[in-house]
Image: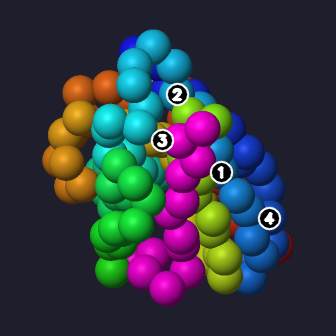
């Protein structure tokens, strides 16, 4: 099982980024996908998840209304659209599976750095 987050980078406050989570080694369409982030010196923060079909999503309060989960099962890829970014969104972002929305995931992969600053 492999999950690879990508698409991070530097963006100014108020800007947008779209992260991708490419999966391999398992039946992607049979698994919900969750996202979390880790900022330096802070605890890991769960961001929420998207269900198997992409028609049910759950968001942490800190990102609700600004972040959007989606997925393309034909491409074995999940997406995290981040809008209205704030400096406090700076973190390494990860995707994971098998563990529910808010707990620890059985499978995670390498994250991608997002930096929000002016």
Give x and y (percent) for residue 23.
52, 28
Proximity of marks 4 and 3: CB atoms separated by less than 8 Å: no
Identify the residue shown where x is 40% and y is 67%: 55
Residue located beneath label 2 in the image: 23
User: Which sits earlier in the primary sequence, circle 4 or circle 2?
Assistant: 4
Residue for badge 1: 19
Could you tell which of marks 3 and 1 lies nearer the N-terminus?
1
Q: CA distance from mark 4 to mark 3?
A: 18 Å
Please state the horizontal and vertical placement of residue 19, each as a whole percent of the image. Answer: 65, 51
- Horizontally, residue 72 falls left or right of residue 15, namely left
In the visual, does 67 lie left or right of 37?
right
- Upstream in the sequence, badge 4 or badge 1? 4
* Crowd class of label 1 (few under 14; some 14 to 19; many from 20; radius 10 Å): many
Q: Which residues are magenta?
A: 62-74
State whether residue 112 appears in this view: no
Q: Nearer the viewer, residue 102 or 10?
A: 102
Q: Secondary structure at mark 2?
A: strand
Residue 64 shown in magenta: yes
Q: Quadrant of residue 88?
A: bottom right
Q: Which residue is mark 3?
A: 94
* Mark linked to residue 50: none
């Amino acid at each position: 099982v492999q999950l690879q987050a990508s698409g991070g980078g530097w963006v100014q406050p108020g800007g947008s980024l779209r992260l991708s989570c490419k999966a391999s080694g398992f039946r992607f369409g049979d698994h919900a996908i969750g996202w979390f982030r880790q900022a330096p010196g802070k605890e890991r923060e769960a961001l929420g998840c998207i269900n198997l079909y992409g028609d049910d999503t759950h968001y942490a309060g800190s990102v609700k209304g600004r972040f959007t989960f989606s997925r393309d099962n034909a491409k074995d890829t999940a997406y995290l659209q981040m809008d209205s970014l704030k400096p406090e969104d700076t973190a390494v972002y990860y995707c994971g599976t098998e563990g529910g929305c808010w707990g620890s995931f059985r499978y995670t992969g390498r994250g991608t750095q997002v930096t929000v600053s002016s």
